[in-house]
Amino acid sequence: MAKPFFSLQKFLRRAQFFLFFLTIAYLMAGSLLLLQRSYLVIQQNNRGTSNVQGSVIDGLMPLDRYLEQRMFRPSYWNTKGLAGGNIQGKTETNILLDQPLWLISRNSELRHLRRRWFHNFVSDREPGQSATSKLQKHTIVNKGTYIGCFVENVEDRTLKATVFYDLRKMTISHCQSACAERTYIYAGLSYGSECYCGNSLPPNRAKEEDCNNECKGEKGSVCGGVNRLSVFQLEKPVVKQRRNSTYRGCYRAPENGTHVFPASFSNLTTDTCLDFCSSKEYPLAITQWPECFCGYPTVQFNLYDRLDDSLCSGSLNDSSGSEVLREENYYSVYQTPMQDTRCTTRRFLPAKSRVFVALSSFPGAGNTWVRHLIEHATGYYTGSYYFDGTLFNKGFKGEKDHWRSGRTICVKTHESGKREIEMYDSSILLIRNPYKALMAEFNRKCAGHLGYATERHWKSKEWPEFVNSYASWWASHALDWLQYGKKLLVVHYEDLKKDLIGKLREMVSFLNAPVNEDRLLCVENNKDGNFKRVGSSQTVMDPFTQDMKNTIDGYIRTVDKALRARNLTGLPEEYMPR
């Protein structure tokens, strides 16, 4: 009896020591993990701070990192297209085996880069925490005089002309310059990063301390607050208004013109009509002697059927030399510098959508421009599979949402492959002439969304390597979506340029959004948005060698054959080999 009791006592003593050392080891391991986690948090914060202070270009082009990698050409491509030309007959295994190495690994690289880029992004949207007393007081700044702090009604803005957002570099002078360029009287800033313009002051003033957000690009300056506007009055730009106005043409007078146009007054000169309509923030000034009308393009007056200008030439010159029209059946129409604001308001979907729609394209095919058109035509933000800080800063607020949030009407993607495509319930496939798309993407790579590559870039070794890698991707991207897309709408970039309203109406219907014809006309009036390339014009030289053309022409024939095999319209004739 004593022996078993002694053995039990010995075992318990050993167990006590074992549990003691196990507890010590557990505590040490936990301490090490906490220390390591604290170090990573500090490291990420330091990296985020440096990113905020650095250039916007640094870290805002996730695709550029893998653009630099050398990619291999697939063996099954030739100058006559896909070997054998049988796309539908290939099994999934054969297709995967046929894919080039760079194409198989591209999607995983994109996801990895997207995650890294997203975690490096530091949100600047939070209101400034600095005390109001530390912020610079409003004074006469640059081109305007500070008026006061006003309440911003998001549902019904008084300053309706949204010019731009910039979560990194917004300053008072930038906003004032943008509004002055469009000849508005007032410039308003909110959230430290948003700029709005208009010719009327908001009705309700707010306490000055409510405008407490520091400008993102100008320390010590106030740029509004949460639902608050810091408003500046600009110098009245009468001369510039007339200089920025353009003649649209001569048009037949609509029936019940007084009901079509929301504003009118007795007019003696074209200049006074332009001044009046600009002050009322209308984009069109219409003269029919002795009347002046202001308004927007509408279904009743869409400005499609321009007539011979001689029909509106029955006019006299007044003492100042300005024309006054006498013909009663025709209108002379002018475009004022005012923005058409009927389609500028956008928001997230009111209820989360369970249907995920892709807006898919090869890079350089005009995806950003089409997103601009869709957002203004539907009134809802578009999302992105990636995160582009440049686009988010410029007003594409859906960029920051997770692509499966269900709050955006469609999602931008450049992905391809069976698994990536089948994640979407339906898709809009945007296709552009590969010659134009390759040059556009190379411009973006070298000079950003709005710039142009220089002649030095086109003559460098980088351009042939870029074409060698990307030309085959243009074809494989379209082929994958044609093969795996569940419900597909194919839109050719060139057709959209030629028939903007018709193709945009088709896309809006495909997205199950209501079609508003006046809103579509507003989009047509603002079709370029803020993403038209500026600066030096595109190179006049032909950067494509004959070998490049032979290769690209083979890809064109392949994609055209695949489209027709699916009973779709083939590629436009301008794509075809010359």
Image (tube, helix red, strand yellow):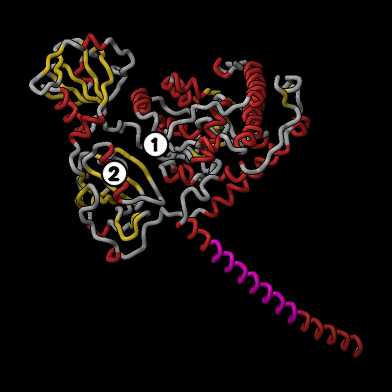
The residue identified by callout 2 is: 177
**Which amino acid does the dot numbered 1 rest on?**
Asn
Decide whether residue 35 is among the magenta residues. yes
Within the image, what quadrant is residue 218 found in? bottom left
Give how far across and how far down residue 452 sits, in percent: 48, 36
What residue sits right under mark 1 in the picture?
Answer: 530
Q: Nearer the viewer, residue 464 or 42?
A: 464
The reply to whether residue 489 is in sight is no
Q: Which mark is residue 15?
A: none
Q: Position of residue 157 (x, y in %)?
A: 28, 41
Above or below residue 33? Residue 219 is above
Categorize mark 1 by other alpha carbons within 10 Å: few (<14), some (14-19), many (20+).
some
Q: Disc 1 and disc 2: Cα gap in Å?
A: 15 Å
Q: Residue at x 41, y 51 (%)?
A: 168
Residue 266 in percent (x, y) is at 11, 22
How far across and down, in percent of the image, does residue 81 sit?
70, 21
Does 333 appear in magenta?
A: no
